[in-house]
Amino acid sequence: MALRTFTSTAKPIARLIEEFNKLPGIGPKSAQRLAYYLLRVPTEQARDLAEAISAVKEKIGLCSICFNITDSDPCSICRDEGRDHTKICVVEELSDIIPLERTGKFNGVYHVLHGVIAPTEGMGPEELKIEQLLSRLQNSSVTEVILATNPNLEGEATAMYLQHLISPLGIRVTRLARGLPFGGDLEYADDVTLSRALEERQEV
Amino acid sequence: MRAPRAYQTEAIVLKRIKLGEADRILTFYTPDLGKLRAVAKGVRRPKSKLGGHVELLTHSLIMLARGRNLDIVTQSQTINGFLVLKDDLWRLSRGLYALELVDSFTAERIENRPIFDLLLSTLHWLCQAGDGNIILRYFELQLLNYLGYRPQLQQCVSCNLPLQPIDNFFSSSRGGVLCPECAGKDPARCTLTLNSLKVLRLWQSCDCATASRVKINSQLSSELEQLMREYIKYLLEREVKSAAWLDRLKKEKL
């Protein structure tokens, strides 16, 4: 469909517009604007962009241990001797590692599931890196698995499922605490959050 | 008269789809407006004041504003968060199955109050102790009832003669029981034992408390499950996705 729209322009430009059009959030007009912009920029700048894109696809892969994105296998976190390899933090998505690292409070290693169990969307355990997690735990020195899936229904379901699978291995399974967000408002807190916050209240 | 710009309704959250950076499109089931889709802005941020009130399996009071395309959720307050459901993998999964069935069978903005009441009661029943499988089967039968797909269990759907107290056959395409004489013509029939027929007849007409008192063994339970699943699959023309998850939980004995 896109090709037909842009047939009036030269073929290479039409192709570029079509490629841009496939990107998320970029419609036909934005794609056109980007393509004509690139026509006008110096050749080196355009080449840099092209190289950056192909480098991402060629050099970046998944770490064979934790399934984080990396340019060397195993990734820098899994290779780091200074980190505590007896603690594994299980997260849903790649983007969940960044905020956890930013806290500077966690010095263990990660495991990325690449999704979450969502029965109504047909997303089951076989679509996730669960088997890999279990084989990673077999005969290892891991003493604790921290389940850091999102605090919503699918995240909870996944955490409960993982807990059923991991507990028999004799490894301590913990879940990130659920409570009130800093800077939030008690008045707007929902029942689940508030009751969990009450249950897990702490001595001050 | 023009519809008001803002309105309030009770709702059960059936489904949610991510939209943009932090928004979600929510599908609600409401008592007076049937199934309803609306946008909830910013609900994926931790500090969202809507967030936990519009989670799946939650009965809430919501305030909506008319939008150009979809309406927008402006306020929400939990009526019942079904905490007991959310803390148990089996209960949670059964709850999700019920939600998916309602979502699959209903069209938007077609009022069907009994379905809302049935769904709400089912979530309550699932919170209580009792055989979850029976509750789901009862829910399925009653749901089909309110949708106009009530299976004919009293007489043969082909010859209209009363059924004999023997093993008969169930035909999904004809929506009811076939007697052994008529069953030969239907290639997609499946056997319906006398016990199954008795239980189904009872569940079709009794309340849930009575339904739960029926003692059924695991063989009868899976026979009924299979039968209902086939019928539902025939009506929807596709599999119910969360059924596969329930099967998996059963297989792994969690």
Image (cartoon, coloured by chain):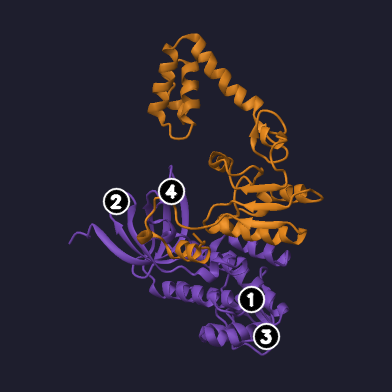
State the separation of the CA atoms marked 3 and 4: 52 Å
**Upstream in sequence: badge 1 or badge 2:** 2
| Type of amino acid at the residue the image marks with label 3 | Asn
Label located before the other in sequence (1 or 4): 4
| Element class at badge 3 | helix
Closer mark to the observer between disc 3 and disc 4: 4
Query: Spatial distance from mark 2 to mark 4, Cα to Cα?
Result: 22 Å
The chain containing the residue under callout 4 comes to B
Q: Position of residue A43 (x, y in %)?
A: 49, 9
In what element is the residue under mark 1?
strand
Question: In front here: B125 or B166?
Answer: B125
> 10 Å neighbourhood of mark 4: few (<14), some, or many (≥20)?
few
Q: Which mark is residue B170?
A: 1
Report the disc number at residue B67: 2
Q: Is residue A183 left or right of residue B186?
A: left
Quickly name the residue at label 3. Answer: B195
Who's the residue at 54% across and 39% down the image? A102
Asked if marks 1 and 3 touch (Cβ < 8 Å), the reply is no
Query: Disc 2: which chain?
Result: B
Instruction: Tell me the mark number nearer the camera, choosing from 2 and 4.
Output: 4
In this view of the protein, can residue B184 be seen by the observer?
no
Q: Chain B is shown in which shade?
A: purple
Q: CA distance from mark 1 to mark 4?
A: 50 Å
Q: Nearer the viewer, mark 1 or mark 4?
A: 4
